[in-house]
Image: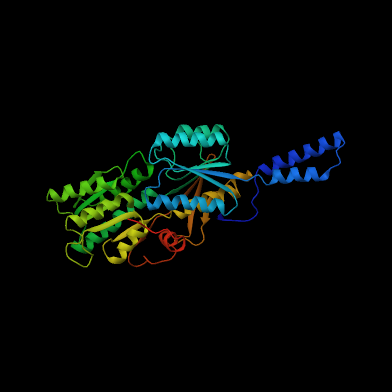
Amino acid sequence: MEIKRQKDGIRHNKIWMSIIMIWCIMLFASCAGMESDSMIIEDVADIEETPITITFAHKSFNSYFYTIMNESVKKAVEERGWIFQNSVADYDPMRQNQQIINFIKQEPDAIITTAIDSISIEEVIRRGNDAGIPMCTVDTNAVGGTLAIDVSFDNYKAGQLAAEVIVEQLIGRYGEARGTVFNAYGKLTSNAWRLRKEGFEEVISRYPDITYLPRATEGMPELVKEELMKAFEDGIEIDAVHCSSEHPGRGLVEALQESGHWYPFWKEGHVILVTIDAEPYFVSLINKGYVDAAIAQDVIAYGDITVDLLADYVLVGKEIPEGEYFCEGTYWQTCDISITGEQAKVTIPPYIINADNSNDIRHWSYVAEKLWGFQYNK
């Protein structure tokens, strides 16, 4: 079944409460002998105009990607005339959990979050469940509790695609899949980073002549740079480098530049570079020949899909249907919705951006930078 995003005809369960309250007002007026219709009309208007409030407990604003994630949710909420409230935890999971608890006390219509720690956030997701508030996650989910909507990225497939691009480049260079591949991976408490690492390694493991150098860098650019610099200082000849996200991936760029390995692909000494996310900075480096490819994660779709499904289904008491979801204006066009118990999981597909398609206006990086006006500041 294909589900199309509908912007019109939004109704909320609060309307039913309004009808009951209107009936009570009219009954009370009748019993008390009230004759003022205007009083009833004013009260009804106040009830019907009660705004819908959506809160977003964000993990950080420390990267361009997360800034656009926040904007995607904000725009999707406010375009419907709803109230948007947010918090930011600066990568502190305990702080994020407390912020969600504070939101629960405010009784919003729904809470959206992107988990810093997929395990520790379970407790507050369950608190939201107990309070009857629809709990939703984007990008990084929770391992426990019930999520009304989970919009995530196929992180495992993204890791596979990144490795496949590198293998293809190595074959083009040597005529076979061989060489040394450096992989700076993020915190494994994050489901997203763990799955990207697993997908990447699944592909690399198929090729015994590839020397694989995994390095734990906690998703921090300075650690990524430090680990790659150490490898160069140890005299290791590295053919390809990869980072599972582009904020820490800047450390790869700095290390390549400072160690004298920064060459475009048409020059000898070029180190193959592939990242995941496809922010404007890395897309620009693809155009300049320094980056071979970026695996795109459409961050703008997170807000659009989550808010649409809240409006069209969750907040009006309808079940989200399983099947294909159409997202107009995106490069990838369709994705899948699967239903497990009471949870709807939407999986956004990854795709490769390279020199052949890097200037397509449907990429989220183009929309964020050229249409929304968010300039990337490295």
Q: In this picture, is 13 found above or below 376?
A: above
Q: Residue at x 51, y 58 (%)?
A: 327
Q: In this picture, is 120 found above or below 294?
A: above
The image shows residue 106 at horizontal and vertical percentages of 56, 36
Q: In this picture, is 362 found above or below 207?
A: below
Horizontal side, residue 66 vs residue 50: left or right = left
Horizontal side, residue 339 vs residue 281: left or right = right
Location of the N terminus by quadrant is: bottom right
Q: Coloring scheme of the render?
A: rainbow
Q: Residue at x 36, y 59 (%)?
A: 280
Give the tally of numbered discs: 0
Q: Residue at x 43, y 64 (%)?
A: 370
The image shows residue 23 at horizontal and vertical percentages of 78, 39
Location of the C terminus by quadrant is: bottom left
User: Relative to the observer, which residue lies in front, 240 or 62?
Assistant: 62
User: Relative to the observer, which residue lies in front, 48 or 183?
Assistant: 48
The answer to whether residue 178 is visible is no
The answer to whether residue 51 is visible is yes
The image shows residue 169 at horizontal and vertical percentages of 25, 61
The image shows residue 140 at horizontal and vertical percentages of 42, 44
Horizontal side, residue 266 vs residue 247: left or right = left
User: Relative to the observer, which residue lies in front, 256 or 90?
Assistant: 90
